[in-house]
């Protein structure tokens, strides 16, 4: 029996086209036989206590997150009675509580390691955990620098600023170990307690992410205020928000190097925290989940016969690094050099976004030509990927609309600001196209077992009669299955044909001498060539998204340095908009790159 036959909830290759015509053969069957056991229609629904526990745990997480956000806001605006020590004490307590839960879960799992537990094959891919481990290693290095910073300023810093990085490093190590071993778990025992533990971990990481974003934004804001003076916008600047401790550091050179080095590592720490939050959220959604019979196809990374996309993408990556270096050197030196740096960045970004949009449109066109069915299996990890793509793209869309309105409403616009108009429009269009390409790619049914399984047999039970139907896809397939000298037609049946005319149509479409495939499909987009083109497109977009993650993550932000938006909207309102939207825009590029890597392995 071929793999996937008779398995509840599974879909055999060719089912999307060959079984459309079999509906007539199933007419008259009892309703209990028409719906296979374990199918989505007959799947058991979540019980009321399970839904109640999920609602209670989510509300607990939101309460913790809201309280933490208010504390972060109070510290950011220098509220009376709220200091950095209070903030770090709360974050340390949250991390310690999560540490206790993770150690308890790991110990309980080790005690029952011989039990067979269900797993979510879509969650916690190996490459995803590997990326998280790399980012976690950089986060630990950042913690070591913070410890060195505390030692240098130990005379005027509270003990919490030394305890926090140590706790954060231990929290990072245990969390990486926990996610490596249990990210795929579908928890079926102690479900209420586990829901609270997992959701606490999700929002603890989100608060740590928010704290990192706030610290990094303060540093970027100070640099931005200094650059505006060189562009002639000194009248809108305010006092620098300097948080240097009120004492001397020993040795001064080491402290200065540590202080500057921490801000270059903050982007990696920010990405680690949000990535860990995503994996923990999928674990929370999987608590008490009913597993269907579908198995996720293992993805393999193959670099064979894919040259054009990676070569062009690596060229873009090298060029981006050069543009960022020149931008950071020239911006803020003088008015002429700052304007030249902005024009250079806009022209480069316009060219790159145009290429990415064109590649995305070509990929969508290939998918429209291909008639492969969609994979409609429900997976929390896959749904989260699609939701995050759309949700985080809204951050850059907000900034782009603000820049467009500023250009249209400003009384006088310098020449270099007009390059911001096509740049802002292309940012919105390119992300819209890329989201469509990625979402359609991750929901495509993979062409698994297309070479190994040549026969599809369907057993139908109708009015007491049993029929066995066999469909062969193409004359070459029939030659492989049938023995030499035997006679076999594309559709044979014992009793009566259960698939009707649909089976014959499938065999005719798959044969080389029969009717061809879709008439509109060009020859250069068939079979392996189509797959090769899609792989090159995906590799190119993957490297381009990494390239576009680098500039804003390391201080190349024309939304700050343009200066026109601050005049139209006001300095503080525009800075608030950018500080709220920019972290989502930065995360979008990294998440899009991760999704494209998964698409590349799946094609």
Image: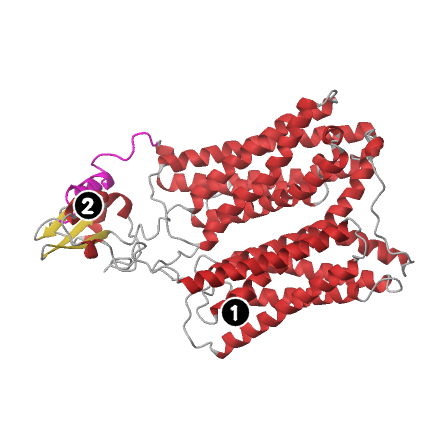
Magenta stretch bounds = 498-521
Marks 1/2: CA–CA distance: 46 Å
**Relative horizontal placement of residue 71, taking residue 293 as reference (left or right):** right
> 10 Å neighbourhood of mark 2: few (<14), some, or many (≥20)?
few
> Does the rendering let one see residue 276?
no
The label on residue 166 is: none
Q: Is residue 242 above or below residue 328?
A: below
Q: Which residue is mark 1?
A: 193
Residue 387 lies, in percent from the top left, at 50, 46
Mark toward the viewer: 1 or 2: 1
Name which of mark 1 and mark 2 comes first in the sequence. Answer: 2
Q: Secondary structure at mark 2?
A: helix
Residue 16 lies, in percent from the top left, at 28, 45
Q: Which residue is mark 2?
A: 23
Q: Quadrant of residue 161?
A: bottom right
Residue 108 lies, in percent from the top left, at 52, 76
> Does the rendering let one see residue 42?
yes
Q: Say which residue appears at 63% left-offset and 56% top-offset.
A: 65
- Residue nearest the observer in this picture, 59 or 469: 59
């Amino acid at each position: 029996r071929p793999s996937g036959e008779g398995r509840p909830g599974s879909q055999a290759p060719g089912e999307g086209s060959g079984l459309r015509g079999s509906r007539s053969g199933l007419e008259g069957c009892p309703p209990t036989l028409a719906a296979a056991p374990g199918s989505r229609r007959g799947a058991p629904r979540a019980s009321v206590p399970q839904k109640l526990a999920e609602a209670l745990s989510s509300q607990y997480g939101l309460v913790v997150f809201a309280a933490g956000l208010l504390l972060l806001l109070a510290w950011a605006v220098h509220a009376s009675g709220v200091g950095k020590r209070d903030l770090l004490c709360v974050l340390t307590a949250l991390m310690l509580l999560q540490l206790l839960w993770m150690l308890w879960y790991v110990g309980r799992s080790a005690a029952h390691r011989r039990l067979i537990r269900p797993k979510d094959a879509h969650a916690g891919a190996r490459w995803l955990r590997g990326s998280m481990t790399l980012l976690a290693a950089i986060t630990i290095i950042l913690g070591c620098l913070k410890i060195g910073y505390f030692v240098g300023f130990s005379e005027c810093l509270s003990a919490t600023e030394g305890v926090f990085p140590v706790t954060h490093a231990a929290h990072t190590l245990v969390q990486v170990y926990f996610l490596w071993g249990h990210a795929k778990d579908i928890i079926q025992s102690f479900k209420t307690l586990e829901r609270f533990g997992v959701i606490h971990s999700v929002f603890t990481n989100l608060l740590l992410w928010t704290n990192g974003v706030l610290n990094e934004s303060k540093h970027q804001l100070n640099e931005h205020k200094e650059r505006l003076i060189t562009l002639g916008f000194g009248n809108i600047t305010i006092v620098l928000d300097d948080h240097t401790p009120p004492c001397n550091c020993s040795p001064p050179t080491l402290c200065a190097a540590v202080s500057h080095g921490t801000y270059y590592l903050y982007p990696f720490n920010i990405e680690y925290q949000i990535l860990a939050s995503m994996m923990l959220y999928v674990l929370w959604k999987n608590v008490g989940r009913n597993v269907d019979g579908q198995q996720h196809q293992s993805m393999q990374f193959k670099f064979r016969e894919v040259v054009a996309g990676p070569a062009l993408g690596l060229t873009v990556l090298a060029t981006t690094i050069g543009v960022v270096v020149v931008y950071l050197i020239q911006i803020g030196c003088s008015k002429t050099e700052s304007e030249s740096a902005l024009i250079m960045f806009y022209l480069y970004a316009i060219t790159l976004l145009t290429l990415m949009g064109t590649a995305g449109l070509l990929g969508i066109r290939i998918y429209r030509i291909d008639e492969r069915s969609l994979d409609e299996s429900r997976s929390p990890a896959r749904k989260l990927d699609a939701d995050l793509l759309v949700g985080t793209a809204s951050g850059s869309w907000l900034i782009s609309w603000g820049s467009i309105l500023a250009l249209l409403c400003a009384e006088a616009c310098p020449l270099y600001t007009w390059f911001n108009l096509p740049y802002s429009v292309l940012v919105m269009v390119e992300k819209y196209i890329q989201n469509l390409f990625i979402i359609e790619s991750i929901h495509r049914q993979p062409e698994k077992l297309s070479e190994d399984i040549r026969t599809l047999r369907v057993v139908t039970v109708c009015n007491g009669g049993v029929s066995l139907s066999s469909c062969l896809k193409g004359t070459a397939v029939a030659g492989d299955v049938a023995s030499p000298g035997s006679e076999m037609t594309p559709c044979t049946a014992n009793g009566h044909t259960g698939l009707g005319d649909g089976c014959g149509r499938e065999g005719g479409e798959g044969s080389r001498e029969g009717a061809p495939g879709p008439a509109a499909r060009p020859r250069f987009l068939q079979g392996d060539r189509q797959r090769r083109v899609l792989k090159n497109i995906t590799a190119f977009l993957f490297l381009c998204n990494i390239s576009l993650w680098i500039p804003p993550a390391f201080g190349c932000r024309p939304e700050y340095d343009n200066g026109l938006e601050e005049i139209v909207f006001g300095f503080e309102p525009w800075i608030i908009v950018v500080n709220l939207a920019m972290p989502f825009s930065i995360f979008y590029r990294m998440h899009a790159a991760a999704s494209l890597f998964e698409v590349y392995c799946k094609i």
